[in-house]
Image (cartoon, helix red, strand yellow):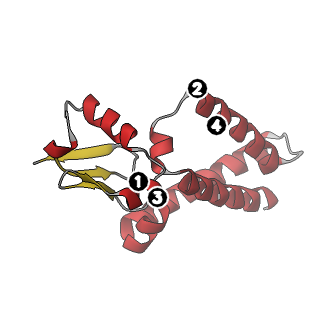
Amino acid sequence: MDIALRALFLYTFVIFVMRVIGRRELSSLSAVDLVLLIVLGDAIQQGLTQDDYSVTGAVIAVATICAIQVGSSYLTFRSRRARRVLEGDPIVIVQDGRLLEKNLVRERMTPDEVAEEMRTQQIASFDEVQWAIIENNGQISFIKK
């Protein structure tokens, strides 16, 4: 039971950390981010199973995390409020060709990063964009005028 409670706590903590990090950061992992995730995974494993190196302990930990994931997935499917808390809402960062500075600051993005993403989608200037929206997965959708 102790392992299941630690798994529940650590799962909740990791979801919280992911929300704080921000969706834009998670959508573009660099080599440093990959190393951080590996180290984070190892640190969580040590806190999850403590001194229990048994197969039973590992099965309990994995089964608990899988159950929590399935439960949260079902919850976000059934409840808009849970979906907003766990996944967030899309955020508009460009409207009618103008950058919305407040939302850029909220997502810790620069205009240069938005322009770079526009260029990858064959958009030359902000004047061509009616809406730019950061989706829940961190990708930016552009709707042309």
Which residue, given by chain and number where applicable, does mark 4 sit on?
37
SS label for mark 3: helix
Q: Residues within 10 Å of mark 2 (few under 14, many from 20)?
A: few
Q: Residues within 10 Å of mark 1 (few under 14, many from 20)?
A: some
Query: Can residue 140 be spotted in the picture?
Result: yes
Which residue, given by chain and number where applicable, does mark 2 sit on?
31
Q: Disc 1 or disc 2, which is closer to the eye? A: 1
Question: Percent position (x, y) of residue 15?
Answer: 58, 56
- Give the mark, 4 or 3, whose residue is nearer the N terminus: 4
Q: Residues within 10 Å of mark 3 (few under 14, many from 20)?
A: few
Question: Percent position (x, y) of residue 9?
Answer: 70, 61
Which of the 4 quarters of the picture holds residue 10? bottom right
Question: Percent position (x, y) of residue 49?
Answer: 81, 47
The Cα–Cα distance between marks 1 and 2, rounded to whole angstroms, is 24 Å
Q: Disc 4 or disc 1, which is closer to the eye? A: 1
Which residue, given by chain and number where applicable, does mark 3 sit on?
106
